[in-house]
Image: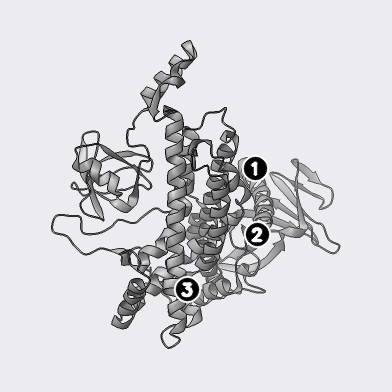
Amino acid sequence: MTRTGLQLISDGGVVYAEALWDHVTMDDQELGFKAGDVIEVVDATNKEWWWGRILDSEGWFPASFVRLRVNQDEPMEEYLAKLELEDEEDGAAMGKLLGPGLPCKEQMRANVINEIMSTERDYIKHLKDICEGYIKQCRKRTDMFAEEQLHTIFGNIEEIYRFQKKFLKGLEKKFYKEQPHLSEIGSCFLDHQTDFQIYSEYCNNHPNACLQLAKLMKVNKYVFFFEACRLLQKMIDISLDGFLLTPVQKICKYPLQLAELLKYTNPQHRDYKDVEAALNAMKNVARLINERKRRLENIDKIAHWQSSIEDWEGEDVLSRSSDLIFSGEMTKISQPQAKSQQRMFFLFDHQMIYCKKDLLRRDILYYKGRMDMDHMEVADLEDGKDRDFNVSVRNALKLRPMVPGGEEVLLCTKKPEQKQRWLRAFADERAQVQNDRETGFTITDAQRKQAMLNACKSHSTGKPKAVTRSYYDFLLRQKHPSLPAALPQQQVFLLAEPKRKASNFWHNIGRLTPFKK
C-alpha cells in the first residue's frame, strides 16, 4: 500500500481498493469478493493480508488480489451525476472545482493518467531489476544454470523489457506533465496492440517457470544466490517468484486502468475515441492470451486421446492440429458401391479423424482414416436421392475434395438438429484456422514432442498421468497466528470477464474412449 493510503487509514480516513480477481473462500475469517468489487480497507499493517469491509461483511483478504483506487474520495458517482445534471440545466456545473483550477471529472482523469504513468515507470524498474539483477548474474554461473533452464525460469521477459521501454517512451511523448488531464495516451495502446501479444508466450510458460524455480529453492545454494542477487541490485524486498508474477499481473491490469480512464474522460475529449478503442483492444489481447493458454493445455489431452486409439496410422494429430472442434457419430457413405459404415468422427482444426467402435467393447476405438479439411468443401444436401452416389439420404451433408483425385464422401446424422450442429462445427473449424493464421498462433515442435512423450509414458504404465499441483502452491506464505494460512489461487487471466461456458467436447471423448482427463 502507498504511504498516502497508510496515512489515510491512520488518520481515520476511508481507503478503497478495487478487486482485480475473484477471491472465493469458505473460511468465515476471510472476505470473499468478485473481480471489480470495491472494498473498504480497514487494516493494512500486514503486507500480504489486509482486513477489509464490503457492506456488512468483514474479513481478511490477500493484498495482491486488489489495487488501491486512484481517487480515494470515491464513491462519487452520485456527485458526478449531480454535476452533470446541473450542467444540463444551467451549464455551470463544470465551474465547480474539486482541485486547484480543475473541474471534478478532469481532476479524476488527471489522477488516473498519473497512476498509469507512475505504475508504468515502476514496472520498467521491476523488469530492469530482473534482467540485470537476476538473469545477468545467472548467466555468469554456468556451473549452476544451463541456458535452457534460464529460458524456462525467465521465459521471454527480456523481450518484454525491450518492448515496454519502447512503449513507455511513446507514453511519455503523449503525457503532459503540467496538465495531465489533457494527455492523449489512447493511441499508444492502439499502436502497440499486436506487440502486447508477446505476453502470451510468457503467461503460457509461467507455470513451468514456477515449478522449475520451486525445485531450485529446495537447495540452499540457490536460495542464497537469488537473495544475493536481490541485495546486490538493491531491489525491494520481494522474492524472485513475486517479480516473475508481475508481467502476468501487468497485462491483466491494463484493461482495468483503461476502463477507469474512459470513465473519467468526457466524450468530447480528443482522447475519448482512442481510449475506448484501446480498452477493447487490450481486452482482446487478454482474450487471446486466455485462448492460447487453453489451446496449449489441450495438446496434452489430444496426445493422450491419440494414445488410446488402436491401430493408429500416419502422422500424429498434433503435427497439424491443436484443438478439437466437435465430435460425434455419423454414417459414412463412400464410393465405390455407396458403401455405408457407422463411424465416430473427431473434427480438429485442419483435419477430421474417423474411427470404428469395437463390437464388444464400445469404449475402444480403432483408427480408420482422416480427411484433410484444408482441401475439402462442405455441402448441405436436401433429403432425397443423391445422383452422384445413387442412394436416398436423410440429414446428409457432402464433403467434396477441392483437389484432383480426392475422395467424395456422404455423411448422415440421425436427426436434423445433429446435422445443423455439424454444419456449424465445420464453419467454426474454418474460422479458427483463419484466425490462427491472422494471429500467428502455432504449436512448437518442442511442445508437440513433449506432449506425445507424456502421453506415451502414461499409456505404457496403464495409469492416468499424475496431476501436478497448482503452480501457485509454491507461493504459499509462512503461517501467521492471526492470519489465513495460505494464499488462494489467483485467477490471473479472468479480468472480471464472464466465465467461459464449459465445453462438452472433451466430455464426449471421455465418454466414448478410455481417454482420461
Q: Secondary structure at mark 2?
A: loop
Instruction: Pick the residue in front: 87 or 508.
Output: 87
Residue 92 drawn at (x, y percent): 46, 15
User: In the rendering, which numbered label is found on residue 420?
Assistant: 1
- Mark 2–mark 1 Cα distance, whole angstroms, equals 30 Å
Residue 512 drawn at (x, y percent): 51, 60
Q: Mark 3 highlights which residue?
A: 152
Q: Mark 2 highlights which residue?
A: 440
The extreme bottom residue here reads 143
Q: Earlier in the sequence, mark 3 or mark 1?
A: 3
Q: Specify the color scheme.
A: one colour
- Along the horizontal axis of the image, is 376 left or right of 423? right
The residue depicted at 47 percent of the width and 73 percent of the height is 152
* Residue 460 visible to the viewer: no
Q: Earlier in the sequence, mark 2 or mark 3?
A: 3
Assess disc 3: are there few (<14), some (14-19) or many (≥20) residues with their C-alpha within 10 Å of its C-alpha.
Answer: some
Residue 30 drawn at (x, y percent): 22, 48
User: Where 370 falls versus 499 (above or below)?
Assistant: below
Instruction: Pick the residue in front: 23 or 122.
Output: 122
- Mark 3–mark 1 Cα distance, whole angstroms, equals 45 Å
